[in-house]
Image (cartoon, rainbow, N blue to C red):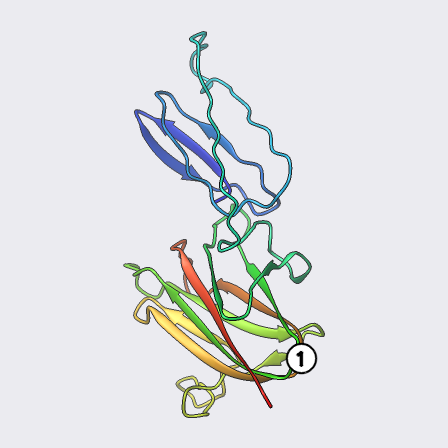
Amino acid sequence: TAGTYYGYGGVLGQYIKNNAGIEVNVVSTDGSKANIQGVAAGDYYVRIDSDNRYINSAVYTVQVDHVSDRSFEAEPNNTPEKASPLYANSTVKGSLTQGNLANDTDYFVLSLTADSQVNLTFSHEKVNMDRAGWKITLTDADGKVYTPFDKNGLPYTDADGSVRNFLLSNWNSEETDGNFRLPAGDYYVCVEAADWFSNKTYSLHASVQKSY
């Protein structure tokens, strides 16, 4: 996850500044490691600095390994224009990061070459926080919101009976899914925090069957 990592005594803690870009600083005192996922293609710079307490002249070694992986979101994908690809009949993973100013929002784009029946399945790691969850909304290129339907062809509703035009995955529902009938075109899936923020890794799967 993009952010600033501090390591003291061999333990890496994470401090997320904001979601304005991908500036990643890894700071450690005794050879700690940081695993950073979801970094978009581009040039990055590694800065080595002291911890603002002592000047250290010891010789150090820096090793950076990377693996190309399209199965994880590529930040920044906080707007439809910068959406990460969501391929038909495949799964992509991601996580929301909490910044100083606002929570992260992840966008994915699904391109359909023909009228299709689409099932979106959203799953996540178990959440131990009461009320934490995710809100998943599907729109087209013009911003039109599409209502998800359950396996019986009925829309999801809130406690007051009103139709819900988004999927909701809470701490007590580790997986949720919705069905859509969509004409050919590009569609955007927005993943954002619901009642409370959670940075647990989630999975988003798009099952696509062309309509004939």
Q: Please, which residue is most extreme toward the front here? A: 212
Q: Amino acid at mark 1?
A: Ala
x and y percentages locating residue 134 in the rendered image = 44, 66
Say which residue appears at 51% left-offset and 64% top-offset: 191
Q: Is residue 171 above or below residue 68?
A: below
Side of 166 where 139 appears, left or right: right
Residue 168 visible, this orientation? yes
Neighbour tally class for label 1: few under 14, some 14-19, many 20 plus, Cα within 10 Å: few
Nearer to me, 14 or 185: 185
Side of 8 where 122 appears, left or right: right
| Residue denoted by label 1 | 184
Q: How many marks?
A: 1
Q: Please, which residue is most extreme toward the top here? A: 57
Say which residue appears at 62% left-offset and 59% top-offset: 83
x and y percentages locating residue 133 in the rendered image = 40, 65
Nearer to me, 146 or 33: 33
x and y percentages locating residue 110 in the rendered image = 60, 69
Quadrant assignment for the C terminus: bottom right
SS at badge 1: loop
Quarter-of-image position of residue 173: bottom left
Say which residue appears at 55% left-offset and 59% top-offset: 106
Residue 194 visible, this orientation? no
Q: Is residue 165 above or below residue 87?
A: below
Say which residue appears at 44% left-offset and 10% top-offset: 59
Side of 49 where 199 appears, left or right: left
Q: Please, which residue is most extreme toward the right here? A: 142
Q: Is residue 38 above or below residue 138?
A: above
